[in-house]
Image (cartoon, coloured by chain):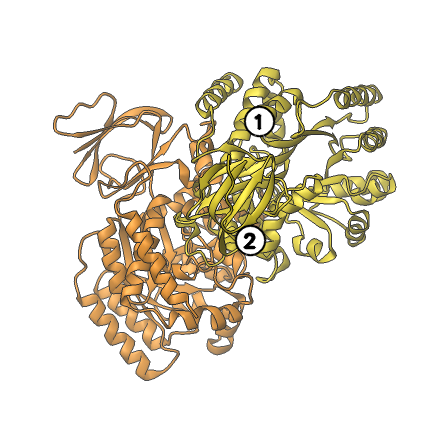
Chain colours: A orange, B yellow
C-alpha cells in the first residue's frame, strides 16, 4: 500500500490510498498502517499520458535528414539506416525511448515497428504499459502476404511477459498491405480479442492513389472490407471525405491524432474539432522521434491545441480539457485499460507535478497549464500500475540506459 | 575571467575563456591563471535566446479565460484584471517572468507593458538584458496623445540602472494609436537612437479596418508616415499584402514572429518562409503568457518550425538553422547587441546544455534537437553578459521570487 498525503487533486488537497495497483480510497485524513507514506505537499496528482501512436525504436534517427521532401527523407536517410537494425540495437533503443516517455509522464504507448520481441522486453523491464504490434507490409506480393500472416500468428501465440504488455497487429496501410493481409490480420485480432492498428489517410496522395486503385478512399475501403470496429485504431486520419467521418463514428473506431508529425512532414492538419463534434473517439500520439522529434505528450498537447484552433479557424475549438482527455483517458479507454483518471477503483497510473515549478504558476487552471505552459521539468514522480517508475525525476538505471543508447547510435549511424 | 573546459561547440570539444563580459578566446588547451574554471565535460555551449516580443507582467493571467473568442477574452477576462495592477504587483510578476525566461534559456527580451519602471528594476536585479518600452495608446483622443507623448519624453529622459537595460517606445498599433502619437514616438526614438516597437497586421480585421479608415493597409501606412527603418520592430505581421513584404525588405524593419499566440488567438499563420526568402529580418517572440501560455523560446521554436512548414505547404521550409537563428542571433542583432553567437569578441550570453539529457540524444544534429526535441530540463547553466544567472538549474533567490509571485496572483485574482 502507498499513501499519498496532502496531494492536490481537482482544486483541493486530499489523501489517496493505493492498494496493489489501484486507487483504493480518495479522501481527507486517511491513516493506513503498513502503508508507505509519500508527503505530496505542493504536488498535484494527474493521470499519466497514453501515447497512442509511435515507432519507439526509430529514436536513433532523431535529427537525421531534417527539412527534406518526404521521399528524399525516407529513401536517402531513413530506410538505409533502418536496414542495419538488429535485436540488440532495438532493445537498447526501446529502453531509451521508454525512458524518455517516463521522464515526460507517459505510462502507456501503442507501438508499431520491427524486432518487437525486444521492445516487449524493454517495456516489461521499465515497468510501464504498451500494446506492441506486429507490422504487416506485403507490398502486394503473395509470398510476402503468407509470410507475414504466419509471423503474425506466431507472434500472437507467444504469451507476453506480464499483464502490462499486450499485443496487436498493424497492417501498415492500404498502400503497402494487400486486402488479403489486412483481412487476415483483422480476423486474427478478433480471434485474440486484441487491437488492429494502421496508418490511414495520412497524406492526400494516399487518398488519391487509393481512389484510383480501389475506387473509394481508404476509410471507406476499410469499412467495406469489414475492418472497422471499436478495436481498430487509425493513426493520422488527416484527409477524410465527409462520408468517412460518419463511417468512423458509426464504427466506433479510434482515431490517433499526430499533429507534430503531420505538420513536420507537411501531411496536413487533421480536422480535430469536426471529429470531436461528430463524437469520434480521438486520442493523441507523437508518432516517431524521427518525425516529431520528441516522444513528449506535453509538447504534443500544445501543438494539438494550437493546430486544432488553426484548422477549425476558431479560438474556441480544441479546448484544453478535450486536448488533455485525448492525451490521457481517451487513449487508455481505447486500449481497454481502466486508467487515465484519478478515481477510486481506477488503475494507479499517474504523475506527480511540482506546484512550485515555474511552468505551472499561477495555478488557476492546472489543465490549461499542462497543455500550454508545462514542460517535463515539472514532473517529479511517475507511477504505473501502482508502482513508482520515476522518483524525484530519477529513473532507476537511467545512466546505463543512456550509455547503451549512445553506443548503439554510434554503431548504427557511423558511415 | 571564466574558463570553460572541454565544452562541446559545433561538433568539437574546446576550451573557452571569458574575459569581463565577452568570449575572449576559443581554442583547445587554454590555461589561464586566476580564471574560475568550469568543467563542461558532456555539456554543449549554445547562444541564449532573445525573446523579441512579450508583455512580461501579463504572466499573472496565465490560464485565465481559455478557449474564448478574442473580444470575450479581452473584455471579460483580461482587461478587468489588468486594471488592478500596481507597481508592486508588476515588480513581483516581472521577476517571476524573468525567472521563467532564465530557466528556459533566454537572456534578453523586448517588452511592452505598463508600470515599466518596475520591470526595469526586475531585469536589472535578475541580471539579464531587456529593451523595455513605454506603450502609447491614445484611442485617438488628443488629450491622451499629449499625455502619452509627455510620459514617453519623461521615460526616455531617466537613465536606465545598467547597460543591460535599454529603453524604447511602443505605439500600440494603428487601430489604437493616432498618426500624431506614432509620428511623435518615432521622432523621439530617432533622437534617442533607440527602438520603436509596435503590433502590426496581427489580425485580418485590423488590416480591413485600416484600409477602410486610411485607404491603405497597416505596413503601407507606417511606411507612408516614415516610421519604418531598421530600428522599427514589428510584432506579428501575419497578414501582409505582397507590396508590403517589399516595403519591409526595403526598410530593413524587423519582424517578430509569434506563432503560438497567433495560433492560440486564431489570428492566422505568418508566411514565414516568404519573409525569409524575401530577405526580411525575422526574429522570434513568445508574446505574453496569457496568449501562449509560456515564455519558453524552446517551445516557440518548435511551433515556428511546424507552423512554418504548414503555412508554406512544404516540409523543406522553416529549416532548423533558420528557426534557431530567429530565436538567437537575429534578435540580438536587431537590438544592436553583439550576442547570439559563440565567437571570440561576442558578448558572453549563452547556455550550457547537458548532452546526456534524454531530449538531446542522439547528438547528431544539436540545432535540430534544440528546435524539435529539447525541453528546458536540458539546460544546466545560463550566462548573461559574462555572469552566471543560473547554475546547475538553480537561480539564486528563486524560492522567494516564486513565493512573492504566488502571493501577488492570489491578491490580483481573488474575486
Indicate which disc, 1 or 2, sits on the residue closer to the N terminus.
1
Q: In the image, is residue A159 above or below residue A48?
A: below
| Numbered disc 2: secondary structure | helix
| Numbered disc 1: secondary structure | helix
Tell me where residue B317 appears, x and y as whole percent. 61, 59
How many numbered badges does the structure rendering display? 2
Furthest toward the left, the residue is A34
Tell me where residue B386 appears, x and y as whole percent. 57, 35
Q: In the image, is residue B7 above or below residue B19?
A: below
Tell me where residue B36 appears, x and y as whole percent. 48, 35
Which residue lies at the image location 25% right of the left edge and 50% below the top edge? Answer: A126
**Mark 1 — on which chain does it sit?**
B
Which residue lies at the image location 46% right of the left edge and 39% below the top edge? Answer: B38
Bin the neighbour count of mark 1 within 10 Å (Cα to Cα): few under 14, some 14-19, many 20 and up: some
Describe residue A178's horizontal placement relative to residue B173 as left or right: left
Q: CA distance from mark 1 to mark 2?
A: 30 Å
Furthest toward the front, the residue is B33
Q: Which residue is mark 1?
A: B77
Whether residue A274 is visible, yes or no, is: no
Placement of the N terminus of chain B among the 4 image quadrants = top right
Q: Which residue is mark 2?
A: B306
Tell me where residue B218 appears, x and y as whole percent. 79, 42
Describe residue B166's horizontal placement relative to residue B250 as left or right: left
Bin the neighbour count of mark 2 within 10 Å (Cα to Cα): few under 14, some 14-19, many 20 and up: many
**Mark 2 — on which chain does it sit?**
B
Whether residue B371 is visible, yes or no, is: yes
Amino acid at each position: 500500500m502507498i499513501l499519498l498525503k496532502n496531494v492536490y487533486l481537482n482544486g483541493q488537497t486530499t489523501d489517496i490510498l493505493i492498494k496493489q495497483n489501484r486507487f483504493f480510497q480518495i479522501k481527507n485524513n486517511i491513516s493506513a498502517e503498513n502503508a508507505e507514506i509519500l508527503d505530496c505537499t505542493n504536488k498535484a496528482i494527474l493521470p499519466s499520458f497514453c501515447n497512442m501512436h509511435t515507432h519507439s525504436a526509430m529514436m536513433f534517427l532523431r535529427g537525421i535528414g531534417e527539412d527534406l521532401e518526404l521521399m528524399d527523407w525516407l529513401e536517402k536517410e531513413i530506410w538505409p539506416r533502418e536496414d542495419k537494425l538488429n535485436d540488440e540495437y532495438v532493445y537498447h533503443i526501446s529502453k531509451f525511448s521508454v525512458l524518455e516517455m517516463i521522464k515526460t509522464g507517459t505510462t502507456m504507448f501503442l507501438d508499431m515497428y520491427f524486432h518487437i520481441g525486444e521492445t516487449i522486453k524493454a517495456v516489461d523491464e521499465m515497468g510501464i504499459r504498451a500494446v506492441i504490434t506486429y507490422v504487416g507490409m506485403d507490398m502486394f506480393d503473395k509470398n510476402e502476404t503468407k509470410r507475414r500472416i504466419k509471423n503474425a500468428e506466431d507472434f500472437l501465440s507467444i504469451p507476453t511477459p506480464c499483464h502490462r504488455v499486450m499485443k496487436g497487429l498493424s497492417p501498415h496501410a492500404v498502400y503497402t498491405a494487400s486486402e488479403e493481409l489486412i483481412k487476415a490480420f483483422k480476423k486474427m485480432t478478433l480471434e485474440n480479442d486484441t487491437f488492429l492498428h494502421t496508418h490511414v489517410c495520412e497524406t492526400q496522395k494516399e487518398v488519391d492513389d487509393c481512389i484510383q486503385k480501389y475506387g473509394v478512399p481508404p476509410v471507406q475501403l476499410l469499412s467495406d472490407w469489414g475492418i472497422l470496429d471499436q478495436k481498430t485504431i487509425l493513426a493520422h486520419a488527416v484527409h477524410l471525405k465527409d462520408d468517412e467521418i460518419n463511417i468512423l463514428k458509426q464504427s466506433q473506431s479510434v482515431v490517433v491524432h499526430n499533429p507534430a508529425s503531420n505538420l513536420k512532414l507537411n501531411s496536413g492538419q487533421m480536422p480535430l474539432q469536426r471529429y470531436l463534434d461528430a463524437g469520434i473517439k480521438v486520442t493523441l500520439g507523437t508518432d516517431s522521434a524521427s518525425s516529431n522529434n520528441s516522444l513528449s505528450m506535453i509538447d504534443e498537447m500544445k501543438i494539438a491545441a494550437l493546430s486544432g484552433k488553426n484548422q477549425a479557424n476558431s479560438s474556441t475549438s480544441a479546448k484544453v480539457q478535450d486536448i488533455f482527455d485525448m492525451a490521457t483517458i481517451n487513449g487508455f479507454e481505447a486500449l481497454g485499460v481502466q486508467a487515465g483518471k484519478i478515481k477510486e477503483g481506477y488503475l494507479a497510473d499517474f504523475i506527480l507535478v511540482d506546484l512550485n515549478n515555474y511552468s505551472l504558476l499561477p495555478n488557476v487552471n492546472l489543465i490549461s497549464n499542462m497543455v500550454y505552459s508545462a514542460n517535463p521539468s515539472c514532473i517529479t514522480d511517475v507511477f504505473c500500475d501502482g508502482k513508482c517508475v520515476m522518483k524525484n525525476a530519477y529513473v532507476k538505471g537511467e545512466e546505463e540506459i543512456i550509455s547503451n543508447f549512445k553506443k548503439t547510435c554510434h554503431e548504427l549511424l557511423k558511415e
